[in-house]
């Protein structure tokens, strides 16, 4: 097993708490299932640091990356309870860039409990991975490749007032820290969200939803030369969900947001930034799942943390497609386009990121799977600095 001595104690603590909560559940009629697995991969990258240009300090080198990843998946399901989780570690080695060698960890636990008129769920995710891959996949924001630690806890309670009307109250906590982030634009942050919502069934296949979000994000710089920011976000929105048939559905939603920003000043006798930002969010989704393939599409405008002492207004288009070609061979393709605008701080960085990833998956037996594919990525992030304000550390890609 790969040694994980560098993982923060908070990851271990959150994992133990989730595991103990799951373990104390009565066994019920179903038994626990445990499935170990291991995967190994070799990949090639012509620009592993995702640099826009080479410098004397940072060369654009091609790399061969070797990864070995053992995992343990477990589950327990009864008529009223569903518990599942996965623990995975990954050892990644780069042949020409030993500074990027890493031991990653991923711990996911989900617990769902159903009552006569209510349902409680608890989801916990703990990760220790690379910022570059994570922030590109989540919000399309290219950054320096550093190790990121993230703890996320999300309990939710839903009560059915009658056959058609349901009230939910959710809470999400996130704590994100970056390793060796000095002289980069990466800044630790902590986030708390209250997520109440009201859903009403118009018929068996149609549902409307009213939802709100009260969100506070506080950045936690460990350098006195970086200002500390607090973002208080209020969002009110609504949605429409339609199940077309047994295999497909679509949904649409929109909302309005108001963000209050309070950023301290790092210069003597210089005021900080206290301002508000407002606008609209929207999302349109389509899903189709059959025995032989799946299609998931999303067109969205949303607010996300950037990991760089600001928020992002993210416009994104995503399509994920899979199709069985033979009983053992599946073709897959993923397309993502992101256009981001920075909210807050004293920089105006508009980021555009595009990703195209076709691949093939061959599964000759239940225990074996061989995947092969190509990933093409392109990013552009021109940077402007507002006048008469101190420039925060940043790096252009």
Image (spheres, rainbow, N blue to C red):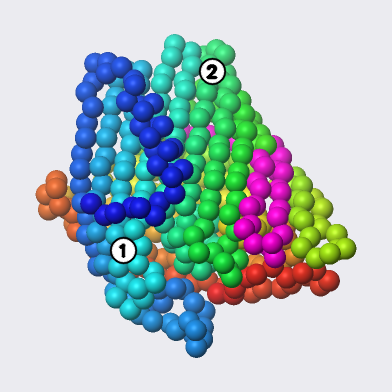
Q: Secondary structure at mark 2?
A: strand
Residue 328 relative to residue 342: left or right: left
Q: Residue at x 23, y 51 (%)?
A: 1
In the drawing, what numbered circle is on residue 92? Answer: 1
Q: What is the x, y in percent for residue 254?
A: 65, 42
Nearest the eye: 353 or 58: 58
* Whole-number angstrom distance, CA of label 2 to CA of label 1: 45 Å
Residue drawn at the location 51% of the way across and 68% of the way down: 144
Does residue 178 appear in the picture of this structure?
A: yes
Q: Which residues are magenta?
A: 215-244
- Residue 236: x and y in percent read 69, 37
Q: Is residue 275 left or right of residue 257?
A: right
Look at mark 2 in the image and give the residue it sits on: 159
Residue pictured at 82% horizontal, 53% vertical: 274
Q: Residue furthest right?
A: 269
Q: Residues within 10 Å of mark 2 (few under 14, many from 20)?
A: some
Q: Give left or right: position of 362 versus 108.
A: left
Q: Is residue 248 visible?
A: no
Between residue 232 and residue 207, name the one nearer to us. 232
């Amino acid at each position: 097993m790969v040694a994980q001595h560098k993982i923060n104690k908070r990851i271990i603590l959150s994992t133990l708490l989730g595991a103990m909560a799951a373990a104390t559940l009565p066994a019920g009629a179903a038994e626990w299932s445990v499935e170990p697995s291991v995967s190994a991969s070799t990949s090639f990258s012509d620009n592993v640091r995702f640099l826009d240009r080479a410098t004397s300090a940072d060369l654009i080198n091609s790399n061969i990356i070797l990864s070995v990843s053992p995992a343990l998946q477990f589950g327990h399901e009864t008529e009223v309870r569903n518990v599942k989780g996965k623990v995975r570690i990954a050892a990644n080695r780069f042949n020409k860039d030993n500074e990027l060698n890493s031991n990653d960890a991923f711990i996911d636990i989900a617990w769902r409990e159903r009552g006569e008129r209510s349902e409680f769920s608890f989801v916990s995710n703990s990760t220790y991975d690379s910022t570059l891959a994570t922030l590109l996949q989540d919000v399309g924001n290219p950054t320096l490749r550093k190790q990121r630690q993230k703890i996320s806890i999300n309990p939710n309670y839903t009560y059915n007032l009658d056959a058609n009307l349901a009230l939910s109250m959710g809470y999400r906590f996130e704590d994100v820290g970056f390793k060796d982030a000095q002289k980069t634009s990466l800044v630790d942050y902590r986030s708390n969200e209250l997520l109440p919502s009201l859903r009403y069934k118009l018929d068996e296949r149609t549902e409307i939803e009213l939802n709100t979000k009260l969100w506070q994000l506080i950045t936690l710089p460990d350098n006195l030369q970086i200002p500390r920011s607090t973002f208080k976000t209020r969002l009110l929105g609504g949605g429409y969900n339609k199940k077309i048939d047994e295999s497909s559905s679509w949904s649409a939603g929109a909302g309005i947001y108001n963000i209050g920003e309070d950023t301290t000043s790092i210069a003597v006798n210089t005021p900080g930034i206290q301002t508000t930002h407002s606008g609209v969010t929207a999302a349109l989704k389509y899903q189709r799942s059959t025995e032989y393939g799946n299609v998931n599409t999303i067109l969205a405008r949303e607010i996300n943390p950037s990991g760089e002492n600001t928020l992002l207004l993210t416009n994104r288009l995503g399509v994920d497609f899979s199709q069985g070609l033979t009983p053992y061979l599946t073709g897959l393709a993923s397309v993502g386009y992101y256009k981001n605008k920075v909210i807050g701080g004293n920089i105006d960085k508009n980021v555009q990121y595009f990703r195209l990833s076709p691949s093939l998956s061959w599964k000759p037996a239940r225990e074996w799977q061989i995947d092969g594919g190509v990933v093409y990525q392109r990013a552009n992030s021109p940077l402007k600095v507002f006048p008469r304000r101190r420039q925060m550390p940043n790096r252009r890609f």
